[in-house]
């Protein structure tokens, strides 16, 4: 395993776990941290025994955004030449489901990263925001787009233009997160969600994720066409025969990933 400096990585019961580990900077997403995160994501994606990936930070901070100290003196040319923002886009290439377990600050690039995941489980202390306006910039890694699709135009405008921060409960109401739990329980909930999905039919999970994501990236007709193609494609898999056979025979299915 590579010698990561900014993240901790472990595997447990079919789940690959990535934990941001820059406590002194509230897990600010430096280019190096993002590079390591994407490397770990691709490594887990390539392992057959991993069925889902969990990304988390600390109880105090999921991530307080991109590293302002590393960006503060950058010119537009530096930003254009940097690999930093493109590393966020790499997350979309991961085939396995990614669940974010979020507590404390989830700001700027941190919120953009959480929204790049497939599901979010939050602690009651989580705070979601896009404070870039305070820095004289706007979100640069999907914050205006994914946020608007998730919470709607009115709330997104307020967050992006006036630094409105959402409580965990508000994030739940607006559809940004799946669950909100007490701080002692959010990680376990996120882990059990990941673990359950990790033991489902792998090909159907992969294509289901792809199909749901298409809803955000394509017009309806194109999305429906892709969904149908993937649905038909799964009838070529052993898991489809096993899953439907097991239902009819009233037994538990055994997934092969084939
Ligand atoms: N980048 C770099 N360092 C950061 C950071 C960030 N995004 N957020 C916090 N830190 C550092 C602080 O500088 C401080 O370090 P020092 O002890 O060396 O001074 C340490 O983390 C602790 O932070 P605070 O003392 O500020 O902690 P607090 O509890 O008083 O405040 C906070 C917490 C409200 C989250 C505050 O730290 C804050 O506002 N952080 C910046 C949030 C932000 O603006 N994020 C957007 C970044 S831009 C972006 O993400 C662009 C994009 O779209 C990709």
Image (spheres, rainbow, N blue to C red):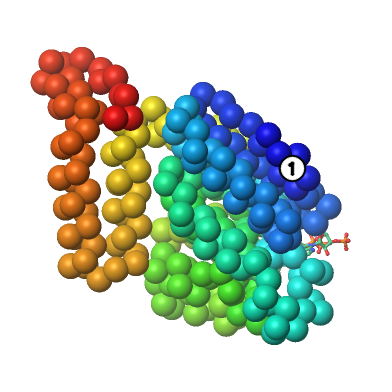
Ligand 1's quadrant is bottom right
Toward the viewer: 126 or 65?
65
Left or right relative to 2: residue 258: left
Left or right relative to 226: residue 52: right
Residue 246 can be seen in this image = yes
Residue 202, percent from left and from top: 35, 34
40 versus 170 height, above or below: above
Residue 214, percent from left and from top: 31, 60
**Residue under circle 1?**
4
Residue at (14%, 22%) from the top-left corner?
A: 245
Toward the viewer: 31 or 184?
31
Residue 71, percent from left and from top: 76, 73
Residue at (79%, 77%) from the top-left corner?
A: 72
Secondary structure category for the residue under label 1: loop
Instruction: Using a 10 Å C-alpha cutoff, classify the residue at mark 1 as few (fewer than 14 neighbours), some (14 to 19) or many (20 or more).
Output: some
- The quarter of the image holding the C terminus is top left
203 versus 151 height, above or below: above
Residue at (75%, 39%) from the top-left corner?
A: 3
The residue most toward the left is 248
Residue 123 can be seen in this image = no
- Labels in figure, total: 1
Judge: label 1 CB < 8 Å from ligand 1. Answer: no
Left or right relative to 28: residue 210: left
Left or right relative to 229: residue 135: right
Residue at (29%, 68%) from the top-left corner?
A: 218
Specify the quadrant of the image occupied by residue 187. top right
- The quarter of the image holding the N terminus is top right
Residue 252, percent from left and from top: 25, 17
126 versus 108 height, above or below: above
């Amino acid at each position: 395993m590579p010698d990561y400096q900014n993240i901790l990585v472990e595997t447990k019961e079919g789940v690959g776990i990535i934990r941001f580990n820059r406590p002194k900077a509230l897990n600010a997403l430096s280019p190096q941290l993002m590079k390591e995160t994407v490397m770990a994501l691709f490594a887990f994606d390539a392992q057959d025994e991993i069925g889902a990936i969990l990304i988390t930070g600390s109880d105090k901070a999921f991530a307080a955004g991109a590293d302002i100290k590393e960006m503060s003196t950058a010119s537009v040319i530096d930003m254009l030449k940097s690999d930093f923002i493109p590393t966020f886009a790499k997350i979309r290439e991961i085939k396995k489901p990614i669940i974010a377990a979020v507590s404390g600050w989830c700001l700027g690039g941190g919120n953009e990263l959480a929204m790049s995941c497939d599901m979010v489980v939050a602690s009651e202390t989580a705070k979601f925001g896009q404070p870039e306006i305070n820095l004289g910039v706007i979100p640069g890694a999907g914050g205006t787009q994914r946020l608007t699709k998730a919470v709607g135009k009115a709330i997104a405008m307020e967050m992006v233009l006036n630094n409105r921060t959402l409580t965990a409960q508000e994030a739940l109401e607006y559809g940004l997160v799946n669950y909100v739990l007490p701080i002692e329980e959010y990680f376990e909930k996120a882990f059990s969600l990941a673990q359950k999905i990790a033991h489902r039919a792998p090909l159907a999970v992969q294509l289901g994720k792809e199909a749901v994501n298409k809803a955000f990236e394509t017009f309806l007709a194109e999305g429906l066409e892709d969904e149908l193609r993937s649905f038909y494609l799964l009838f070529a898999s052993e898991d489809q025969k096993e899953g439907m056979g097991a239902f009819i025979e009233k037994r538990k299915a055994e997934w092969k990933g084939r």
